[in-house]
Image: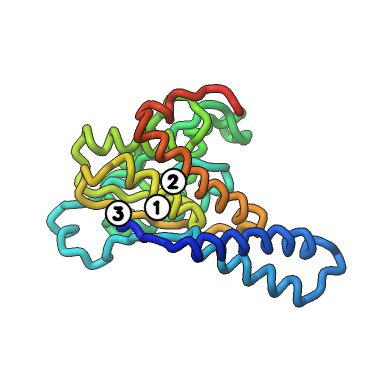
């Protein structure tokens, strides 16, 4: 994972961008918001995305694919709406022959009603149904459970990294929301610590508002400056906190 050093002025400029984004979010939501305010809001959105998005992709023409050296692909968790975008992205990658196996976060509980079965689907059943609709063979999908905790990406990073190391994965592909890619890259980069050969991160394009981008920017700062440094001192931190804060 390449680390990019940023000057204090860079951080200050983005802090100001976030501040202005909050103000423009407030004014742009007003019914009588001017076109100029909306344009400035769009500029803030673009600035935030430039900071949040960081993809590293496996070349489609990688000669190693023909030799059977396919990667393991993991789809990070999220809302049902978000997972639909992620599963479609994962299917595109799989159909290119880049991944040999797809890992999906197991989510206990029930979801929407299925008239054919006359009952509500379990979350894992729903996920498998959506993947099969994308022509992903059932035998190519495995579900992975997580220990309980609060910070989902932190727990996923630790758990999947542990699996990747123990099982000897040479290449790992991660699929997440596009505006989560930088945070996911930081999390997995730290937990893997270069103990697998290659890590790739793909973003699934989702339509999210400025409010969500601001929220994600602050989450990025929390992970980068608080949670991940704390994990160096307390490696079991992702599994240690079980109650909401």
Mark 3 vs mark 2: in front: 3
Q: Can residue 135 be seen in this view?
A: no
Q: Residues within 10 Å of mark 2 (few under 14, many from 20)?
A: many
Tell which circle, 2 or 1, labels the residue nearer the N-terminal end.
Answer: 1
Disc on res. 1: 3
Tell which circle, 3 or 2, labels the residue nearer the N-terminal end.
Answer: 3
Count of numbered circles on the image: 3
For this orientation, the residue located farthest to the right is 32
Tell which circle, 1 or 3, labels the residue nearer the N-terminal end.
Answer: 3
Up the image or down, 172 lies above or below 15; here it is above
| Residue contact at pointers 1 and 3, CB within 8 angstroms | no
Q: How crowded is mark 3: few (under 14 residues within 10 Å), some or many (20 or more)?
A: some
Say which residue appears at 26% left-offset and 38% top-offset. Answer: 164
Q: Would you name the residue on which mark 2 appears? A: 131
Residue 187 % position (x, y): 39, 44
* Structural distance between the alpha carbons of marks 1 and 3: 22 Å
Quarter of the rendering occupied by the C terminus: top right
Say which residue appears at 42% left-offset and 35% top-offset. Answer: 230
Say which residue appears at 59% left-offset and 33% top-offset. Answer: 111
Element at label 3: loop
| Residue contact at pointers 2 and 1, CB within 8 angstroms | yes
Image position of 116 (left or right of 2) = right
- Seen from the viewer's position, the closer of residues 191 and 147 is 191
Residue 112 % position (x, y): 62, 36
- Seen from the viewer's position, the closer of residues 92 and 26 is 26
Disc on res. 90: 1
Disc on res. 164: none
Mark 2 vs mark 1: in front: 1
């Amino acid at each position: 994972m390449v680390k990019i050093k940023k000057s204090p002025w860079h951080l200050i400029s983005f802090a100001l961008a976030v501040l202005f984004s909050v103000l423009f979010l407030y004014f742009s939501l007003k019914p009588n918001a001017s076109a100029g305010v909306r344009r400035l809001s769009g500029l803030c959105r673009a600035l935030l995305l430039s900071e949040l998005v960081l993809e590293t992709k496996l070349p489609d023409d990688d000669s190693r694919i023909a030799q059977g050296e396919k990667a393991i692909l993991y789809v990070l968790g999220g809302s049902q709406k978000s997972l639909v975008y992620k599963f479609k992205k994962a299917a595109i990658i799989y159909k290119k022959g880049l991944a040999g196996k797809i890992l999906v976060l197991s989510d206990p509980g029930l979801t929407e009603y299925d008239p054919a079965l006359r009952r509500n689907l379990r979350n894992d059943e729903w996920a498998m149904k959506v993947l099969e609709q994308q022509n992903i063979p059932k035998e190519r999908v495995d579900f992975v459970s997580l220990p309980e905790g609060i910070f989902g990406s932190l727990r996923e990073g630790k758990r999947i990294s542990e699996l990747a190391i123990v099982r000897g994965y040479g290449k790992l592909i991660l699929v997440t929301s596009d505006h989560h890619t930088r945070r996911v890259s930081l999390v997995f980069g730290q937990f893997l610590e270069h103990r697998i050969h290659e890590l790739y991160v793909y973003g699934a394009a989702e339509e999210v508002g400025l409010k969500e981008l601001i929220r994600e920017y602050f989450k990025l700062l929390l992970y980068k400056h608080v949670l991940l440094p704390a994990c160096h001192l307390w490696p079991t931190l992702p599994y240690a906190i079980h109650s909401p804060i």
